[in-house]
């Protein structure tokens, strides 16, 4: 069910709009200002497009494009003019919005940051991408963890970004912290199309969680993004899918967080997020609540190491033109130089 794209909104429904935004080329501060204005205009379009819409979601790289340019002149601050314009757009159009910025980080490389702003213009979620798409992306690893907020209609919402969604642990973390809706914004291009589709569905089904996922769309003359807005129900079924590849199209659907809550409480078979911590509860009271997974123990102990670790060939960004890093995680540029 998707309420005819949200046209027929139920009492418990949350209507989401995914903007398959035209991929821009942003080189100068003037370009950045123009793209900010474009996004603001698209927020207004979303509201005009569907009066029932609760949340409009823009893709990763909506503001900066796919150049991976780290020029400080086009990096953003949370208290900067671009974010201020997004806040005003949400207030003016009485809508929640999810936005993407590349955030200036004076002590290191920029952060790839996602923001959810409510209809009063308040930042409700601030997330820094945990898993940049290495070796292509130069962004600093996120240090905020995975926040979960209460959104429209009380829905619990999390945000992850692009490559994050290829790690099942990321979606599991969202759900474990209570998320009923997980947003996934991306700039992916066509070679990732099939992986994008099945991970969006798997992330939903494995966690009894709605996933709402959208990429940039169209070409900037060098790269071709695929759009592929997808809203997936908690049983893994696709309830809305942008298959036309038309830039600036808004893919919409009504989702039902109340039914997520019902499934998580009432399902027996395939209630996998519960069963992970209660193995074989039919055989033993409460199920086995141990942690039998070697990789979890090793990661906690700082000893994560693959059997083929020494044979891995790509371990930094030099193949994509970036210098090999000299800082360790958490170290600032000025300290690394000492």
Image (cartoon, helix red, strand yellow):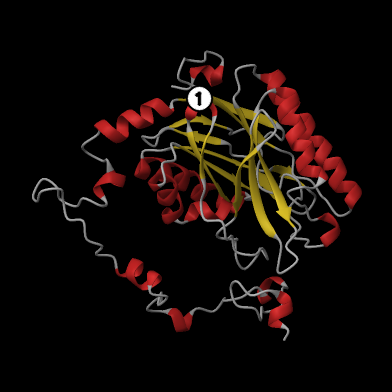
The x, y position of residue 218, in whole percent, is 72, 42
The x, y position of residue 165, in whole percent, is 50, 51
Mark 1 residue element: helix
In the image, what residue occupies the spot 33% across and 70% down? Answer: 297
The x, y position of residue 185, in whole percent, is 60, 45
Residue underneath mark 1: 153
In the image, what residue occupies the spot 73% across and 49% down? Answer: 78
Mark count? 1
The C terminus lies in quadrant: bottom right
| For residue 166, above or below residue 202 | below
In the image, what residue occupies the spot 81% across and 40% down? Answer: 36
| For residue 256, above or below residue 298 | above
Residue in the foreground of this view, choosing between 203 and 141: 141
Label 1 environment density (alpha carbons within 10 Å; few <14, some 14–19, many ≥20):
some
| Residue situated furthest right in the rendering | 30
The N terminus lies in quadrant: top left
Residue in the foreground of this view, choosing between 315 and 294: 294
| For residue 27, above or below residue 305 | above
Dividing the picture into quarters, in which one does residue 108 lie? bottom right
| Residue situated furthest top in the rendering | 8
| For residue 224, above or below residue 268 | below
In the image, what residue occupies the spot 59% across and 33% down? Answer: 242
| Residue situated furthest left in the rendering | 283
The x, y position of residue 65, in whole percent, is 75, 50
Dividing the picture into quarters, in which one does residue 326 lie? bottom right
């Amino acid at each position: 069910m998707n309420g005819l794209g949200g046209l027929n909104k139920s009492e418990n429904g949350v209507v989401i709009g995914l903007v398959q935004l035209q991929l821009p080329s942003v080189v100068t501060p003037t370009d950045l200002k123009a793209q900010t204005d474009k996004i603001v205009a698209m927020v207004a379009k979303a509201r005009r497009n569907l009066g029932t819409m609760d949340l409009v979601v823009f893709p990763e790289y909506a503001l900066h494009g796919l150049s991976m340019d780290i020029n400080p002149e086009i990096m953003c601050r949370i208290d900067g003019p671009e974010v201020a314009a997004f806040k005003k757009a949400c207030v003016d159009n009485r809508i929640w919005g999810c936005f993407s910025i590349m955030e200036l980080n004076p002590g290191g490389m920029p952060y790839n940051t996602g923001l959810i702003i409510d209809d009063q213009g308040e930042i409700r979620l601030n997330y820094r991408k945990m898993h940049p798409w290495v070796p292509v992306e130069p962004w600093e690893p996120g240090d905020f963890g995975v926040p979960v907020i209460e959104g429209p209609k009380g829905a619990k919402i999390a945000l992850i970004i692009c490559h994050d969604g290829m790690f099942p642990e990321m979606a599991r973390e969202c759900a474990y912290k209570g998320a009923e809706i997980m947003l996934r914004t991306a700039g992916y291009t066509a070679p990732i199309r099939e992986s994008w589709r099945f991970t969006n569905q798997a992330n939903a089904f494995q966690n009894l969680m709605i996933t709402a996922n959208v990429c940039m769309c169209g070409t900037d003359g060098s790269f071709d993004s695929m759009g592929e807005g997808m809203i997936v129900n908690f049983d893994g079924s696709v309830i809305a899918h942008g298959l036309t590849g038309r830039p600036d199209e808004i893919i919409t659907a009504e989702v039902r967080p109340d039914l997520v809550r019902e499934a998580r409480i009432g399902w027996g078979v395939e209630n996998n997020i519960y069963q992970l911590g209660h193995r074989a509860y039919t055989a033993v009271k409460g199920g086995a609540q141990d942690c039998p997974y070697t990789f979890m123990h090793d990661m906690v102990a700082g000893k994560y190491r693959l059997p083929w670790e020494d044979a891995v060939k790509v371990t930094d960004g030099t193949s994509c033109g970036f210098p090999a890093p000299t800082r360790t995680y958490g170290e600032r540029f000025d300290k690394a130089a000492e």
